[in-house]
Amino acid sequence: MADFSEVPDHQLLQQITQEQESALEALYTRYATSVFSLAMFMLRQPPLAEEVTQDVFLNIWRKAATFKADRGEPKAWIMSIAHHRIVDVIRSRRRAPPITEPREFDLLELLPSSGASTEEQVERNLDRERIVKALSNLPEAQQQVVILAYFEGYSQSEMAEKLQQPLGTVKTRVRLAMQKLRTILEDYGTEQS
């Protein structure tokens, strides 16, 4: 396999459109841990999180040509694909009754199969702690909509119905919550430097 360590993400995506499997492998090496972590955080089931991670990279292989560099960074695009896939899984699980209760998982099962380094694991755990801490700084109504939207997969219309609130109120809460979270997380980032 060629050395892709210095190749920018957008070039890897371009190479994927030309069906270069090694470019997909390089992208997988860079982002599988992030995708798996998000899936694990939202789904809390290692086998399901691994399946979602594989689905995301299969989707990247199939749809790399749809990436538009002028609309954002490749990492944001990849994580958006991951988030949408996870939400799809959550919604389908909400419709279908569970066959068995999810079992408790060992800490070791949280590690993705891509072999993330200890440093990456620590960084991922710190990111998770920062997000949870930032979320706790939001007013309860804003916490509620963020949790429903990003961790339980509700659409804004579904949240309005569930919370028995006007859609405009829900949209405002989501927007304000995201603005506050961004500010809080940026502040955490400067504190760490």
Image (cartoon, grey):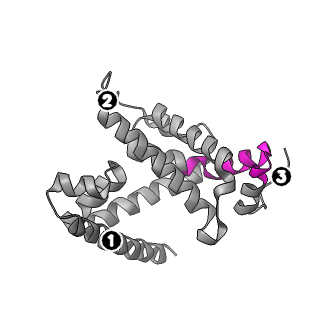
Residue 175's disc number: 1
Extreme-top residue of the structure: 99
Name the residue at 40% across, 72% down.
182
Name the residue at 31% across, 51% down.
154
Residue 125 magenta-highlighted = no
In this rendering, which labeled residue sits more in front, label 3 or label 2? 2
Confirm or deny contact between disc 3 and disc 1 (CB under 8 A).
no
Q: CA distance from mark 3 to mark 2?
A: 44 Å
Q: Quadrant of residue 144?
A: bottom left
Q: Which residue is mark 3?
A: 3
Asked if residue 115 shows in the view, the reply is no
> What's the residue type where badge 3 is placed?
Asp
**Which stretch is magenta?**
15-34
Q: Quadrant of residue 103?
A: top left
Q: Quadrant of residue 55?
A: top right
Asked if residue 154 shows in the view, the reply is yes
Q: Does residue 146 appear left or right of residue 74 in this picture?
A: left
Residue 96's disc number: 2
Please state the horizontal and vertical placement of residue 22, each as a whole percent of the image: 79, 45
Q: Earlier in the sequence, mark 3 or mark 1?
A: 3
Q: Does residue 120 appear left or right of residue 140 in this picture?
A: right
